[in-house]
Amino acid sequence: MKVSLMFLAMVCHCVYGSAALKTRGGGQAPACPSEKTPIDTGCDDLPADADCATYYTKINTGKHVKCGKSGTQCVATGPVCQEPEYILGGLLTWTACSQFCQGKGVNVVIPGSADEVAHIKGLLPAQGTGQHRAWIGIEKIGGAGSWKPTPSWTNWKPGGEGNQRESNAGIIWDSGWNGYWYDMNPGSRTHYCVCKQ
């Protein structure tokens, strides 16, 4: 019996741990529950007395699979779930925002279109004037050279990009800017932190 359970655990871990795992019909997996406890190891690495059903093991970027019990062993039982595409981290400095996103295994958002800029604005809590600002995940080390990584699309305020050797960038919706990008040396200023899978 013990051998059979170990074999079952190995099969479940291999199948659900595959990056090629598809949902039924090849569609998008449902959203992961907010109360899940993510782990980077396999479900079968959890101790026998663990409450397996509260754990989800990561199978690839943004996807997790639910753990469960098979006899006395924790195994990957499913279903697969998908993390939200955008994660909001609140008002943070550039450094804290970058660290927050990296801690989630993702990056600070780099908008790829005007529609995405509008979507990002819709994610932000309603605030007073001066608070509709979000970081963009590009930077110039020492304020020199080109932006890294190179954005596929930009929306710089006309005449307002790269004139002061700034190292970071953000999006502004205040005072008629309507989603224009601007660059600055961030220091201790805070903007909304938005991460993207």
Image (cartoon, helix red, strand yellow):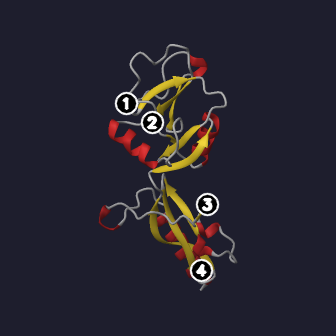
Measure how far apart labels 1 and 2 are at the Cα level.
9 Å
Badge 1 or badge 3: first in the primary sequence: 3
Dot 4 lies on which element? helix
Badge 2 or badge 4: first in the primary sequence: 4
Q: Quadrant of residue 156?
A: top left
- Name which residue lies at 41% across and 33% down: 179
The residue carrying mark 1 is 152
* Amino acid on which the number 3 mark rests in the picture: Thr
* Amino acid on which the number 4 mark rests in the picture: Val
- Name which residue lies at 66% across and 69% down: 46
Classify 122 as above or below 136.
Answer: below
The quarter of the rendered structure image containing the N terminus is bottom right
Q: Quadrant of residue 114?
A: top left
- Residue 75 left/right relative to 30: right
* Amino acid on which the number 2 mark rests in the picture: Ile
Mark 2, other Cα within 10 Å: few <14 / some 14–19 / many ≥20: many
